[in-house]
Image (cartoon, rainbow, N blue to C red):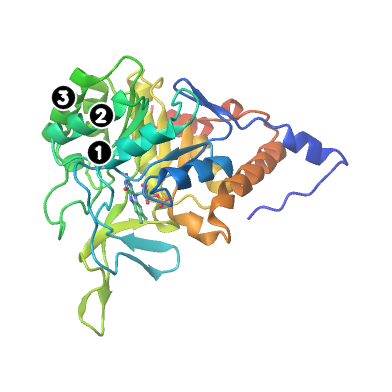
Amino acid sequence: MIKIQFQKKDDAKEIKAIDTSIDLFDLKLKNPLILASGILGVSLESLMQILKAGAGAVISKSIGFKPKEGYVNPIVIKPMENVFVNAVGLPNPGYQKFVKNIKEYNIDFNKIPLIISVWGGNEEEFSTIIGSFQDVGVKIFELNISCPHSDPKSRKLIIGQMPDKTDQILKDLKKIKKNNTKFIIKLSPNVTDITEFVKIAISNGIDGISAINTVQALEIDPYLEMPVLANYFGGQSGPSIRCIAQKKLADIILYLRKNNRSNIPVIGVGGIRNAEDVMRFLLLGVECVQIGSAISYYKNPVECFNSISNELKKIMYKQGYNKISEFRGKVIKVIEERYK
Ligand SMILES: Cc1cc2nc3c(=O)[nH]c(=O)nc-3n(C[C@H](O)[C@H](O)[C@H](O)COP(=O)(O)O)c2cc1C
């Protein structure tokens, strides 16, 4: 972690004044730090608490068609330093219950940066779930087509690995999309060419792209002579996947720039642990970032957003920046130059 030497008496005042806000569609987020889907936020109450504690925005656990209990333990393991592997099996209350909760809460989605993550087994499920959420005012959706362990035993291809299926879902969703609804598609790193999916998403009018979901993984117990996770196969997350995420994001951003579509915001996720990592992603050109597994490194998990946001201000001050727009994308330009 970087240590900032204070030069002047009023450094602290100047650091406090640094503007970390960003625009995500019609919302102004006070900082670029978003709670990733599936981490901490299962109930609306906990999501609201995390917002209050300093997150720029929050994303719900992926909500599916039917209530789902998820897989039996072990579901999350830490096989070595900086490596997390999970197969939780998308436990969630089902969309009907969650829609009811939202109604009871009476949330103003024009003001509250709460993004609903949706997971469906097919196009009908996606459309039904999103239709119901739109009816209670939800404005921003993250479409989770990329969970590597959505199927028990996880041997089949997932939606986010099948271009035709992805295309079909997006085509159907276009038909029910309201004017002010925004769709962010969450892409899988477990594909050969991620830009194939970016192309499909753009052709279906996608509003935003987030990447990456977890990386397919397997851990084995040498004494039990068995896979460790109850589901056997899972998804890897945490600091060990950060460089993979950065490469996939570079591919996505280079593609958008080449095709004059840099107006589509990209949200970076994967392995972010601290403000230096946030800087890395912003330099690559993402609009904002999501933080997941690394929250577990913080003594008080909900405090992590405030703490990273304050550190980000210090690094920006050290580097001479007042706003994120002053340095966003600097590194992608370097990469672009090289490959012209
Ligand atoms: C325990 C756990 C549960 C997750 N659940 C979801 C989920 O419901 N929907 C989703 O889109 N991603 C889910 N993810 C993936 C994260 O949102 C994120 O994409 C991934 O973990 C990489 O980020 P990280 O390294 O910061 O954790 C989950 C990850 C973990 C570790």
User: Would residue 24 be found to the left or right of residue 327 on screen?
Assistant: left
Q: Position of residue 126 (x, y in %)?
A: 19, 33
Q: Is 77 left, or right, of 71 in this rendering?
A: right
Q: Which residue is mark 1?
A: 96
Q: Is residue 163 visible?
A: no
| Quarter of the image that includes the N terminus | bottom right
Percent across and percent down for residue 46 are 47, 47
Q: Amino acid at mark 2?
A: Ser
Name the spot of residue 227 as percent of width and height, x first. Answer: 22, 72
Report which quarter residue 12 is drawn in: top right
Q: Is residue 77 left or right of residue 45?
A: left
Which of the two residues, 1 or 114, is positioned nearer the viewer here?
A: 114
Image height of 97 relative to 295, above or below:
above
Circle 2 packing at 10 Å, graded few (<14), some (14-19), many (20+), is some
Tag 3 secondary structure: helix
State left or right for residue 298 relative to residue 187. Answer: right
Residue lying at the far bottom in this picture: please name it: 223
Nearer the N terminus, badge 2 or badge 1? 1
Q: Which numbered marker is on residue 132?
A: 2
Spatial separation of the CA atoms under disc 2 and disc 1: 8 Å
Mark 3 vs 1, N-terminal side:
1
The residue to which callout 3 is attached is 172
- Asked whether residue 139 is in view, the answer is yes
Few, some or many C-alpha atoms within 10 Å of disc 1 (few <14, some 14-19, many ≥20)?
Answer: some
